[in-house]
């Protein structure tokens, strides 16, 4: 028996989403319901191509942000040596802060479906900023080019990199995000080595220009393969919607991340100096500590993120945040070069999930997918503020008297406190007890 198709029947959901002429993009006061989105494919060529797209963006954005230590060294010893190290450090801190704060503005733009506008404009701005760095000579010029212009470009593309993968995955979302964020570790290994090899041969300006061309080429590929799966939100969004903070699970998650990111990057900034001052590590080996840290972080974003797909991203975030804090305290007893090298690799691995899992944690406590961009943007702004405050605060604790115990305790306390707050989110989500995916 064959059934005739009713000409008056409504088109099915997938037909509506795939037909631009039938997709209603009008503004409505009603938020898109969760059932308006077909179930994610959770795999397949298109889904994994979006992971690769996100990988390329993180390779450039977080890869270069985590490479700032190399810029800092060159500025301190050559180009900007008349400025104090703390003054120069503000370039890197401000760049990180601007990148994350811009996400607060791009979140609603992402929710409205303008992903390629963000990608195109962000790529152009970040490449212009990088090329401008190669022409700078004065402190204010570096601040404008590197912190402001490049940081703004980073922020425009950071939201698409963060929000695209959860659209295509459900049970494998944490793994997909983990693989994508491995791009940041990969970039933070490749770019420092490029500095080490190229600056003595061709100089700082041309090294930066080559990096700019690499960024341009890889971002063109990312722009070409990015595909949105969810329809645009039909609700007008505020840039900062404080109504989201009424969701206690989301609010506590943001607070937990803010406190954790006050400490998580401390060793990314200071481990090289710690090795030189406390263990007498030679500068050649100390240079590679940052690469070792990021290599450890690369693997730390794979296995734990796979486990997060089984037991839940929040559970893994709590465990590895706590372990990162405990490991930080262990550095108080490590005074030898081999011990510091081992600590660096292990800390990179254990801290990797803490950096990569905020995205799936935020989406897991936000069942309405139409507000993911806005919520991620607000949480990223808080993370950016934490990094802006945390590293100078750690530097102030260290001071001129090499107060390394104080700096280490600061890092450890922040990470343990972060895990304690995230435990409260878990209790609100699945209740008391060890069982329950969260």
Image (spheres, rainbow, N blue to C red):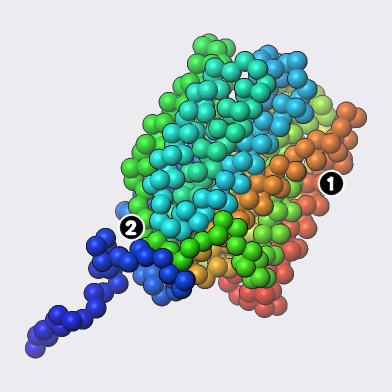
Comparing 164 with 197, the one in front is 164
Q: Residues within 10 Å of mark 2 (few under 14, many from 20)?
A: few
In the image shown, does 111 or 272 lie closer to the viewer?
A: 111
> What residue appears at the point 57 percent right and 36 percent down from the top-left corner?
151
Q: Position of residue 332 (x, y in %)?
A: 84, 41
- Say whether marks 1 and 2 touch (CB < 8 Å): no
Q: Which residue is mark 1?
A: 409
x and y percentages locating residue 424 in the rendered image: 72, 69
Is 394 above or below relative to 425? above
Q: Which mark is residue 316?
A: none
Give the farthest residue toward the left.
1
Give percent across and percent down for residue 404. 85, 36
Separation of marks 1 and 2 at Cα, in angstroms = 45 Å
- Side of 103 relative to 370 (left or right): right
| Residue assigned mark 2 | 44
Q: Is residue 357 visible?
A: no
Give the mark, 1 or 2, whose residue is nearer the N terminus: 2
Element type at mark 1: helix
| Quadrant of the image occupied by residue 10 | bottom left
Residue found at x 41% / y 50%: 115
Location of the C terminus (image quadrant)? bottom right
> Residue visible at 55% across and 60% down?
238
């Amino acid at each position: 028996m064959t059934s005739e198709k009713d000409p008056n029947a409504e088109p099915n959901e997938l037909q509506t989403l795939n037909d631009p002429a039938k997709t209603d993009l009008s503004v409505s006061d009603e938020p898109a319901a969760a059932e308006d989105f077909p179930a994610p494919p959770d795999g397949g060529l298109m889904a994994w191509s979006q992971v690769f797209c996100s990988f390329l963006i993180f390779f450039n954005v977080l890869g270069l942000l985590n490479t700032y230590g190399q810029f800092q060294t060159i500025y301190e010893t050559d180009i900007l040596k008349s400025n104090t190290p703390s003054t120069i450090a503000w370039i890197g801190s401000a760049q990180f802060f601007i990148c994350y704060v811009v996400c607060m503005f791009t979140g609603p733009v992402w929710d409205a479906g303008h992903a390629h506008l963000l990608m195109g404009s962000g790529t152009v701005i970040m490449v212009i900023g990088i090329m401008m760095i190669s022409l700078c000579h004065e402190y204010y010029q570096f601040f404008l080019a590197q912190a402001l212009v490049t940081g703004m470009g980073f922020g425009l593309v950071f939201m698409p990199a963060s929000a695209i993968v959860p659209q295509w995955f459900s049970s494998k979302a944490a793994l997909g995000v983990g693989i994508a964020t491995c791009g940041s570790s990969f970039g933070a290994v490749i770019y420092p080595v490029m500095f080490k090899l190229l600056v003595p041969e061709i100089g700082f300006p041309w090294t930066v220009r080559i990096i700019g061309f690499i960024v341009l080429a890889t971002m063109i590929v990312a722009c070409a393969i990015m595909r949105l799966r969810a329809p645009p939100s039909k609700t007008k969004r505020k840039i900062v919607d404080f109504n989201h903070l009424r969701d206690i699970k989301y609010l506590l998650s943001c607070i937990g991340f803010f406190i954790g990111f006050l400490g998580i990057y401390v060793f990314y900034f200071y481990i090289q100096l710690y090795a030189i001052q406390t263990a007498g590590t030679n500068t050649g080996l100390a240079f590679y500590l940052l690469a070792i840290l990021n290599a450890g972080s690369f693997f730390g974003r794979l296995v734990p993120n796979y486990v997060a797909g089984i037991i839940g991203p929040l559970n893994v975030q709590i465990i590895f945040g706590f372990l990162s804090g405990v490991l930080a305290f262990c550095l108080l007893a490590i005074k030898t070069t081999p011990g510091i090298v081992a600590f660096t690799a292990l800390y990179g691995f254990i801290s990797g999930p803490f950096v990569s899992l905020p995205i799936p944690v935020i989406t897991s406590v936000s069942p309405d997918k139409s507000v993911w961009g806005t919520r991620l943007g607000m949480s990223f702004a808080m993370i950016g503020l934490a990094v802006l405050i945390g590293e100078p605060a750690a530097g102030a604790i260290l001071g001129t008297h090499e107060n390394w115990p104080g700096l280490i305790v600061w890092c450890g306390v922040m990470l343990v406190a972060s895990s304690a707050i995230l435990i409260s989110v878990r209790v609100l989500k699945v209740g008391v007890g060890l069982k329950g995916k969260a």
